[in-house]
Image (cartoon, rainbow, N blue to C red):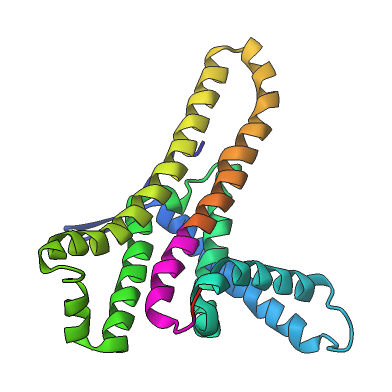
Amino acid sequence: MNEVSSITIHFGSFELVIQQSILVWLVVCVLICILAWFAGRAIDKADPSKAPTGLAYWSEELYNLCLYVVKGNLRETTGRYMPIFGTIMVGMLISNLTGLVGFQNPTSNVSFNATLAVMFFLMIQYNAIKKGGLMARLKGLTEPMWFLTPLNIIGELAVPLSLTMRLFGNILAGTIISLLIYTLIKSLAPWGYLGLTLTPFIHVYFDVFSGVIQTYIFFTLGTYFLGEQVSNEEI
């Protein structure tokens, strides 16, 4: 595991500390921009009468994967939200795999997850107000009976908190367990080197499988609550 967890930048008396997880996310964003540019060129050059190949094919498969996650919840509004959710989803998938090369996963940083969760929360509230107006939104918090209003408010606030802590807890737990296993193997050297044969399986579960599943759950839940406000179709 990489021991450098943050970078400190000094501006006179001001000190800016940037966590490794945030730097990893910035790098992932740059890589996505570069890949998207090449993918766009590949799609423009592709013959629509033939099956896509190469980068155009993988871009289409990735789009279909993201579409599968959000379409059931967003329904007829899927096209409007696919650019932002598809981009963030791909970024989260890639960032969850950075543990394979020894970097800290951005989703193991609670502030990163909270930012995405608050984004969902604000989108939900904005579209709820846009859909029926501010008074209708406030009235909805008092239904079905006025004395349940505090519980309804808590339920609304629980959405970003649940999204944040579920993703943070699962990803961080995987990181800690992997680190503990590596520490155990190191302490048992030289016999511990035999344990290195187990590490690929550890990363397959905690970095690949768990990362994909947690990304799926995060966007499935987030778009479910958003879909209740933006979609007019019945599930």
118 lies above or below 139: above
- Magenta segment: does it hold 79? no
Q: At 23% from the left edge and 88% from the top edge, which residue is drawn?
A: 133
Dominant secondary structure (helix, strand or loop) of the stretch shown in magenta: helix
Q: Position of residue 89 (x, y in %)?
A: 53, 65
- Magenta segment: does it hold 225? yes
179 lies above or below 101: above
Q: Position of residue 12 (x, y in %)?
A: 19, 61
Q: Position of residue 34 (x, y in %)?
A: 62, 73
- Image position of 133 (left or right of 212): left
Between residues 219 and 96, which one lies in front from this camera angle? 219
Residue 101 in view (yes/no): no
Residue 174 in view (yes/no): yes
191 lies above or below 147: above
In the figure, residue 120 lies in which quadrant?
A: bottom left
Q: At 30% from the left edge and 80% from the top edge, which residue is drawn?
A: 128
- Image position of 11 (left or right of 56): left
Q: At 49% from the left edge and 78% from the top edge, which residue is drawn?
A: 234
Between residues 67 and 58, which one lies in front from this camera angle? 67
- Image position of 142 (left or right of 48): left
Magenta-highlighted residues? 218-233
